[in-house]
Image (cartoon, rainbow, N blue to C red):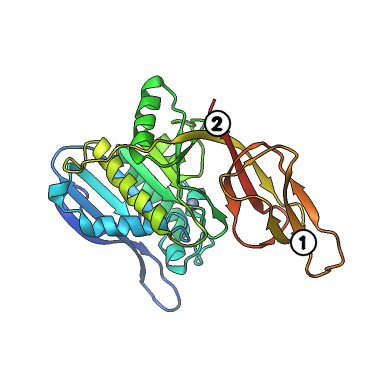
């Protein structure tokens, strides 16, 4: 096992269902010799693949946290083939606070890989995931959403794949999850220096997909139902949930990133378009108003890229540099 200061309540080699905490040492004013309790559940039943499922990589993204929490309670070892490892609050301090980043060290876990075993709590957790958990895994599924500042339709994210074989595997996972949209990005592969959990999976040769499921800092019944169905379909597709009978797929529209539109002014954003809308480059995207000086003309923001609105900003107040929209176009 890689060098780490994090102790685990669960034995990754043991059969059956185990629940407990990863204990991340954190000695602070109110708690000498204390540790941060990162919840973990493992379910193992004989031979089969190992899959790591995580939510709360960003603490204010709740769809995955709820879906994985329900899964932890529902599944028994009899349901499973292989080994399932579940983290419902991967960046625990952030998830506990309902924030994207950790209030302890301001760490964004999904920008902290490959991490540092002797670094801040967020860096130590990134290192544990990359160096202790990833090497155990065949599959890594990381459930994100738009969080507090963005909203997406239910979208699966996957790489294009470096080889036809890898692409086939990723497309099979995409079909299994059966979200209305897939966002396909260029593969980084084993040599990647990406700071994300997907980058960590790439470095370790672990097959990975992630999601952007809704957002707005809340959970909706429709997206949660799609998420729970998608997770079971994923596990069934890799042979880990043999008793599950998936229903007929509804189909996925494959997109690639066209571009991101940012605010170049400060004020209150009035969007002119809704999620899923088709827009043209140069067309009006919205207005940034200045209620502080209501006699001033608003600045009109124009789309830099045409395509479909894949993500939209939630908070009304914007600063220069804030993301207003992400635009996708059909995959080439
Ligand atoms: Zn996220």
Q: Is the shortest distance between ligand 1 and the CB of mark 2 under 8 Å?
A: no
The quadrant the C terminus occupies is top right
**Pointers 1 and 2 in contact (CB under 8 A)?**
no
**Quadrant of the image occupied by residue 138:** top left
Query: Disc 1 and disc 2: Cα gap in Å?
Result: 32 Å
- Asked if 293 appears above or below 181 in the picture, the reply is below
Which residue position holds label 1? 289
Foreground pick, 5 / 103? 103
Q: Viewed as shown, does residue 169 lie left or right of 315?
A: left
Which percent across, then down, holds residue 107?
51, 58
Q: So how many labels did they put on this image? A: 2
In this view, which residue lies farthest toward the top? 164
Which percent across, then down, holds residue 181?
47, 40
SS of the residue at dot 1?
A: strand
**Quadrant of the image occupied by residue 164:** top left
Can residue 3 be spotted in the picture? no
Foreground pick, 197 / 177? 177
In this view, which residue lies farthest toward the right? 295
Which percent across, then down, holds residue 57?
43, 54
- Asked if 322 appears above or below 203 in the picture, the reply is below
Mark nearer the N terminus (1 vs 2): 1
Picture residue at 32% right of the left edge, 51% below the top: 228
Foreground pick, 134 / 95? 95
Which residue position holds label 2? 330
Picture residue at 64% right of the left edge, 51% below the top: 323
Q: Viewed as shown, does residue 52 lie left or right of 164?
A: left
SS of the residue at dot 2?
A: strand
In this view, which residue lies farthest toward the bottom? 30
Which percent across, then down, holds residue 45?
14, 45
Picture residue at 70% right of the left edge, 58% below the top: 270
**Quadrant of the image occupied by residue 66:** bottom left
């Amino acid at each position: 096992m890689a060098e780490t200061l994090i102790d685990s309540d669960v034995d990754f080699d043991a059969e059956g269902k185990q629940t407990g905490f990863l204990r991340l040492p954190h000695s602070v004013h109110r708690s000498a010799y204390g540790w941060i309790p990162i919840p973990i559940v493992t379910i193992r039943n004989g031979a089969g693949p190992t899959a790591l499922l995580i939510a709360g990589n960003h603490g204010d993204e709740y769809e995955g946290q709820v879906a994985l929490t329900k899964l932890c309670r529902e599944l028994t070892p009899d349901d499973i083939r292989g080994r399932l490892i579940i983290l419902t609050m991967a960046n625990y301090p952030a998830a506990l606070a309902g924030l994207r980043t950790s209030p302890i060290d301001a760490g964004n876990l999904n920008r902290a890989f490959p991490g540092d075993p002797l670094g801040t709590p967020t860096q130590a957790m990134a290192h544990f995931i990359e160096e202790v958990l990833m090497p155990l895994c065949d599959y890594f599924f990381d459930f994100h959403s738009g969080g507090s500042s963005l909203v997406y339709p239910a979208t699966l994210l996957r790489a294009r794949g470096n080889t036809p074989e890898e692409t086939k595997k990723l497309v099979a996972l995409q079909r299994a999850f059966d979200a209305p949209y897939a966002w396909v990005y260029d593969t980084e592969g084993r040599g990647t220096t990406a700071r994300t959990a997907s980058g960590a999976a790439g470095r370790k040769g672990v097959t990975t997909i992630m999601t952007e499921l809704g957002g707005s800092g809340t959970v909706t019944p429709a997206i949660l139902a799609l998420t729970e169905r998608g997770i079971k379909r994923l596990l069934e597709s890799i042979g880990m949930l043999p008793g599950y009978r998936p229903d007929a797929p509804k189909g996925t529209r494959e997109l690639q990133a066209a571009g991101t539109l940012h605010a170049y002014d400060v004020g209150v954003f009035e969007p002119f378009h809704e999620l899923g809308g088709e827009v043209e480059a140069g067309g009006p995207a919205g207005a940034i108003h200045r209620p502080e000086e209501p006699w001033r003309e608003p600045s009109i923001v124009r789309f830099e890229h045409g395509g479909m609105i894949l993500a939209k900003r939630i908070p009304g107040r914007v600063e220069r540099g804030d993301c207003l929209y992400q635009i996708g176009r059909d995959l080439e």
